[in-house]
Amino acid sequence: MAQRVAVITGTSTGFGFETAKKFAAAGFRVFGTMRDLTGRNAEPKRTLEQLGVTVVELDVTSQASVDRAAATINAATDRVDVLVNNAGTAHMGIVEGFTPDSLERQYATNVVGPHRLVRAFLPGMRARKSGLVIFVSSVVGRMVLPFTGVYTSSKWALEALSESLSYELRPFGVDIAIVEPGAYATNIGNVAVSPDDVATLDAYGEVGKTIEKIFAGLVASAGDPVEVANAIVSLSEARQGTRKLRTTVPGGSPVDAINAASEPINHSVLEAYGLGAFLPEGAFATHA
């Protein structure tokens, strides 16, 4: 059997870094992408390369960068079996305090970026009628906390894109999986982007500082990012056509109840519109 190939974005830290290591240990040929290979990310690049990961420069907010990275990867291998859209940022704070430019930057990374990667690697998967695309979302891709609206809305948008793709790609044998982590000890909180309209932020006074309590709660409950990496690799090992659309990590999250309640509703709507063939057990189902 040919060595399976995985492409993972955002591998400099956190979920992406741990996932790249796990895939390499599982025998995959791994392409890990990140920005600034000769600067701040030189050390994680060296670490991953020592484990056999091929590190490729990629900025998901730049179409030219994605095109160059995809060309490099496609020149090195004739297939990509698993694409993990992990790269992301978090704009956290009062919604009114973010300017439209800041909102656009959040969506550029968390929504448009994954879409660019999908367009880069899906053609090969569709042609082979085989492949898996994993989107790293969040439990707040299914629920909302105050002062997280910009970040949360980007994850809701990512979930919508992902679920729609899951239906559209079923005739082509390509699986979509969404991973929804809870609070984990990654670097995303340390580099979270604050509101950039200072005058509006000041107008909220003490109310605006509530975000500090939210961060404190997240830090106190943070788990080991390896759990998320394990869940991603486990999805890659599942049989084609049998993978769950959504996986919370850790399991047992309150979001599981939301997912369980919404799935039959969504499926009944598709049935009502005559689209039952696109459902997991429909005419287009594949269980290779």
Image (cartoon, grey):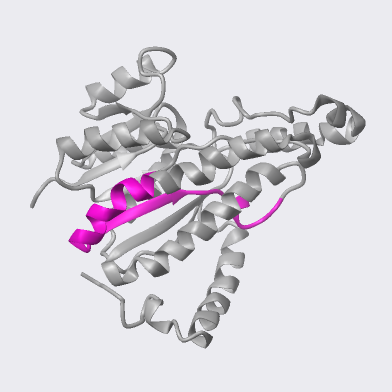
Which residue ends up furthest to the top in the rendered image?
Answer: 39
Q: Nearer the viewer, residue 174 or 241?
A: 174
Residue depicted at x 21% and y 44% = 5
Residue 2 lies, in percent from the top left, at: 9, 49
In magenta segment, residue 141: yes
Residue 284 lies, in percent from the top left, at: 31, 77
Residue depicted at x 26% and y 64% = 239
Residue 261 lies, in percent from the top left, at: 60, 73
In magenta segment, residue 221: no
Which residue ends up furthest to the front in the rendered image?
Answer: 64
Residue depicted at x 29% and y 60% = 238
Q: Is residue 49 above or below residue 177?
A: above
- The tally of labels here is 0
Q: Quadrant of residue 287?
A: bottom left
> Quick check: 35 left or right of 266?
left
Q: Is residue 21 visible?
A: no
> Quick check: 221 left or right of 176?
right
Q: Quadrant of residue 189?
A: top right
Q: Which residues are magenta?
A: 117-144
Residue depicted at x 33% and y 52% = 234
Residue 148 lies, in percent from the top left, at: 71, 43
Q: Quadrant of residue 185?
A: top right
Q: Nearer the viewer, residue 166 or 117?
A: 117
Q: Is residue 250 above or below residue 35?
A: below
Q: Quadrant of the C terminus?
A: bottom left
Q: Is residue 69 visible?
A: yes
Q: Is residue 154 above or below residue 259?
A: above
